[in-house]
Amino acid sequence: MICVTEASGTVSSEVIKQLKVAKTPFRAAYFSRQKATAARTRGIDAVVIDYSNPETLRAAFQGCDKLFLLGPTLPNQTQLELNGVETAEQAGVQLIVKQSVMCADEEKYTLARLHRAVERGIESSRMAWTFLRSNSFMQNAITFMGGTIRAESMFYSSSGDARISHVDVRDIAAVAVRALTGTNHEKKAYTITGPQAITYDELAGELSKALGRMIHHVNLSPEDMKAGMLA
């Protein structure tokens, strides 16, 4: 049995879709009681977990030998995921496939340091592991930028002319499912990227062609970008 955490998340929800297609038994662990209830009405083995409550983790991991691990995006995400690692080992989980970030091993930016600390905790456990170090999600263009694209035909960043190899979460999920159901992926870290590194100006051009109207990328200073996000 595979337990998929953060079951309503961008990647985890796609992992669940692909496990269903493969007819692989799984349990979906949600942070929301409402979402877990809705999943049960669809015939899914669904539970509610709270990474700060070991009892909910033990209940979710009971009877599972494999775990897709992703914690909530909170300032203490590292500690919360480490709580999950500790409980998983106690519950008899044999393999953790952890959703991580690109270049986590280099620890040169905040998210990398956050995820690498969890990776080290997994490495020091008795469990087998696979790390998925993916680049920025292609779906972020909808999740985080979709509102202003729809309302203003614009989206904002402070990335300048940086090139990013955005990756489709369906591809990340395919790797996750292969690692969870296949063999020879233990103690391996996979860097997962899209096929091409593009600037946000180039992304705006692609969106313009796809949508049939001009979409503009507006580059802001980091300070202005932060102020806008806080607002």
Image (cartoon, rainbow, N blue to C red):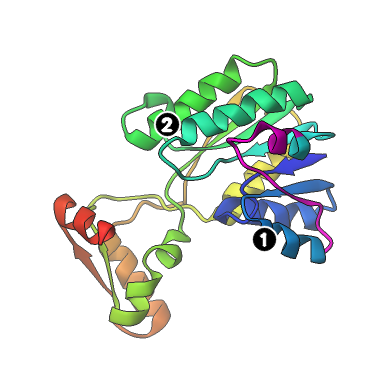
Q: Is residue 113 above or below residue 154?
A: above
Q: Can the viewer see residue 222 in this picture?
A: yes
Residue drawn at (59%, 14%) of the image? 124
Residue drawn at (15%, 51%) of the image? 223
Q: Residue 86, position in %: x, y?
A: 64, 23
Q: Is residue 149 above or below residue 77?
A: below
Q: Is residue 148 above or below residue 171?
A: below
Discs 2/1, front = 1
Q: Residue 191, position in %: x, y?
A: 50, 36
Q: Residue 220, position in %: x, y?
A: 16, 59
Look at the image and say whether residue 185 sits in the magenta stretch: no
* Residue 128, quarter of the rendered image: top right
On-image quarter of the N terminus:
top right
Residue drawn at (30%, 79%) of the image? 153
On-image quarter of the C terminus:
bottom left
> In the image, which disc is placed on residue 35?
1
Look at the image and say whether residue 43 sits in the magenta stretch: yes
Looking at the image, residue 60 sits to the left or right of residue 76; the answer is: right
Looking at the image, residue 226 sits to the left or right of residue 38; the answer is: left
* Residue 175, quarter of the rendered image: top right
Give the residues drawn in magenta, as a range. Answer: 42-58
Which amino acid, by three-letter code, is at mark 2?
Leu
Which amino acid, by three-letter code, is at mark 1?
Lys
Residue drawn at (60%, 26%) of the image? 188
Q: Can the viewer see residue 186 in this picture?
A: no
Residue that protrudes farthest toward the bottom in the picture: 212
Looking at the image, residue 121 sits to the left or right of residue 186; the answer is: left
Q: Residues within 10 Å of mark 2 (few under 14, many from 20)?
A: many
> In the image, which disc is placed on residue 114?
2
